[in-house]
Image (cartoon, grey):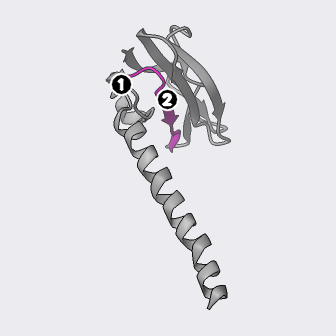
Amino acid sequence: MVGTKWSAVPWGVGAALVIVVASAAAPVAAHSPASHRLAERIVLMNPDNGRAVPASLGDDIEVRLTSYRKNGLNYTWDIPQSSDSTVLQRTAGGKTPDGGASAVFHAEHAGKATISAHRSCRPDPGRVCPLVVVPWKATVTVK
């Protein structure tokens, strides 16, 4: 019987420690300031041209522009840029083999910045592109 008595003691002490640790951690979470929130990832695509976008400090704004092909013409994008890198800092950017482009911007400071890109045409051999460059932009206000 002595062995049973001693083997139950570590379990009782372990359970008591779990209860103490759990109760000590609960008030810390309950008193966290409400101003702390998880950063969001806002995704913008071709149809978001002209959109006004609200963002908060720490948010990421991802731009994904897809190319397309029509009547032997390939419409491709350049890599999106920010008009103010102190407000929106580009952290990634690139082009796809088919002419799409993407970029990720991090909201660094409060303010307003415009993300812009341009669509242009690359013709197949024997085709002629219209001499038109189409702009894409979204205005981001960071608070």
* Quadrant placement of the N terminus: bottom right
Residue kind at label 2, given as amino acid type: Asp
Q: For marks 2 and 1, give the CA distance.
A: 18 Å
Q: Nearer the viewer, residue 59 or 113?
A: 59
| Residue 4: quarter of image | bottom right
Are the residues flagged by discs 2 and 1 in contact, CB closer than 8 Å? no
Q: Nearer the viewer, residue 13 or 128?
A: 13
Residue 85 among those drawn in magenta = no
The residue tagged 1 is 35
Residue 53 marker: none
- Left/right placement of residue 77 relative to residue 132 reads right
Residue at 42%, 10% (x, y): give it: 110
* Disc 1, SS: loop
Q: Residue furthest bottom?
A: 1
The residue tagged 2 is 60
* Disc 2, SS: strand
Residue 48 appears at what percent x and percent y?
A: 36, 31
Residue 132 appears at what percent x and percent y?
A: 48, 19
Residue kind at label 1, given as amino acid type: Ser
Number of marks present in the image shown: 2
Residue at 36%, 24% (x, y): give it: 35
Q: Which residues are magenta?
A: 56-69
- Left/right placement of residue 109 relative to residue 56 reads right
Residue 31 appears at what percent x and percent y?
A: 35, 32
Q: Residue furthest front?
A: 2
